[in-house]
Amino acid sequence: MEFCDADKRKLRDALSSRTPLHGNLMTFIGLDEVRERFPELWERQRERITETSRAILRQFTDPRTDIVLPIGDEKFAVLFTRLDKTEAMLRAGIIKAEILRRFVGDESLEHLDIRTDALDIDSGDETTGVLRDLLNGAGAGRAQPAAAAPAPARSRQRQRAYRASIEEIGADWSMPIDEIEQTFGFDLDSLEFAFQPHLYARRGVFSIFECRAVRYDATGAILSGYDVLPRDCTPGQITAVDKMTLMRARHGLVDMAFRKRIAVVATPVSFETMSTRATATEFLDLLRKIPSDLRNYLVVDICRAPVGVPEGRLAEIISPIKQLTRAVFVRVSSAQQSLATLKGAGAFGAGLNMPSRAGRDLGSPGFLGRFAASARKLRLQTYALDVDTQQQVASCREAGMDYMAGRALAELSDYVGPVTGMQSA
């Protein structure tokens, strides 16, 4: 790889002050495909393409540990200091796919071989990876450790994305902030909300952004979703998380509309919230406060549904939500839950959380394959959350899961990216 003298100096300075590297792999994220396949677009929007690329790189890198350097006019050198070589190549390919998708769209992207170059700092060897091959081969034959969780938000540099305060998020709630805080049972200053990108496996691009409550425990470990609540949480606390998360998702949609770059956003709601008339009405009323054109880009994920819930009961919950949003998914918690029941009740898709220990029924490759195959027969979309290792990425792809999300692919972020297409329910 050829570098001008100025680029050599930048790399030398960065490497001299870097933190210890895990994989010692320098990846190069270039815009060659845009320049070569779409020369008119490149000449007309070169500056915008470069600035958007910088914004996406900020979204998917950690400013405390990773190094991002512009190289010439159409390439970035990126060192992911917490990732090993395989993980770094995969992350670089995903970032490049996201950059390209913003400008050429999903359809054009599907026909591109997205290539990423890399340089081994120790040996000087150069290598090239194709994203499709990296995704297909991720974790083959070996278990990978999970990527490190992001540091507490208060200790990391803020990304340049809109961030709603707790006061703004709670503005649509009739209850004062101090009473909301009493409902949660902990200081709301410790509660934040972020978006988890979901990778659409068939095209290798992020197309859904799931809103989650986020908190850090006393050890600094990240808690998200309903895990931010105490173990003995009450139905009122669960509903509070549902409502606050929906309101944060609304702010994300409004912000994207203001910038004219709409994304598909997912937000959870618990079976408990929708099973009680009063709390279900409150949640639906909050949904109605979102402008209808924005609700076209909102999907709702029903969580904590018990095994054996009758199809008719589930349909009563799904139907009013489906009328107000783009689609409704249901998250299963047991291998015993019937996908046919979910389909009959009106769900558009079904998903699950990957277990932290390999071998448990929901995370075993055998179950994932059966789950995905059954869903395909029923024409249900599928997703897997907490995909935190490359071995889990490989298991999900082998099974044929439609969407996957977790630290192995992208970390939680304040940013919601645009999407150009998603099959409507």
Image (cartoon, rainbow, N blue to C red):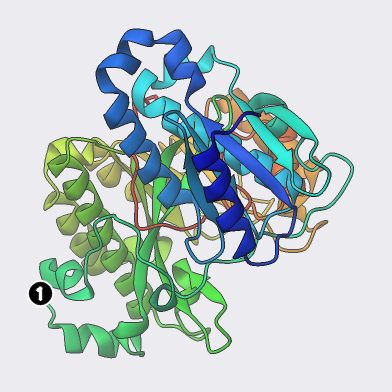
Q: Is residue 341 among what the camera can see?
A: no
- Residue 159 percent location from the top left of the image: 35, 59
Q: State the residue in front, 201 or 181.
A: 201
Give the total number of marks visible in the rendering: 1
Q: Residue at x 35, y 65 (%)?
A: 158
User: What kind of residue is marked 1?
Assistant: Ser
Q: State the residue in front, 280 or 30.
A: 30
Left or right of residue 233, residue 8 in this image? right
Q: Residue at x 67, y 40 (%)?
A: 89
Left or right of residue 27, residue 40 in this image? left
Which element is circle 1 on?
loop
Position above or below: 117 against 279: above
Q: Please tell me how crowded label 1 is: few (under 14), some (14-19), or many (20+) other residues with Cα within 10 Å.
A: few
Rendering quarter of residue 57:
top left
Q: State the residue in front, 225 or 97.
A: 97
- Residue 103 percent location from the top left of the image: 35, 23
Q: Is residue 13 among what the camera can see?
A: yes
Q: Residue at x 15, y 69 (%)?
A: 168
Q: State the residue in front, 70 or 398.
A: 70
Left or right of residue 243, residue 121 in this image? right
Q: Residue at x 56, y 57 (%)?
A: 13
- Residue 12 percent location from the top left of the image: 61, 52
Residue lying at the far right of the rendered structure: 141
Left or right of residue 311, residue 407 in this image? right
To which residue does mark 1 refer?
Answer: 174
Location of the N terminus (image quadrant): top right
Position above or below: 199 against 21: above
Location of the C terminus (image quadrant): top left
Rendering quarter of residue 345:
top left
Residue lying at the far front of the rendered structure: 5
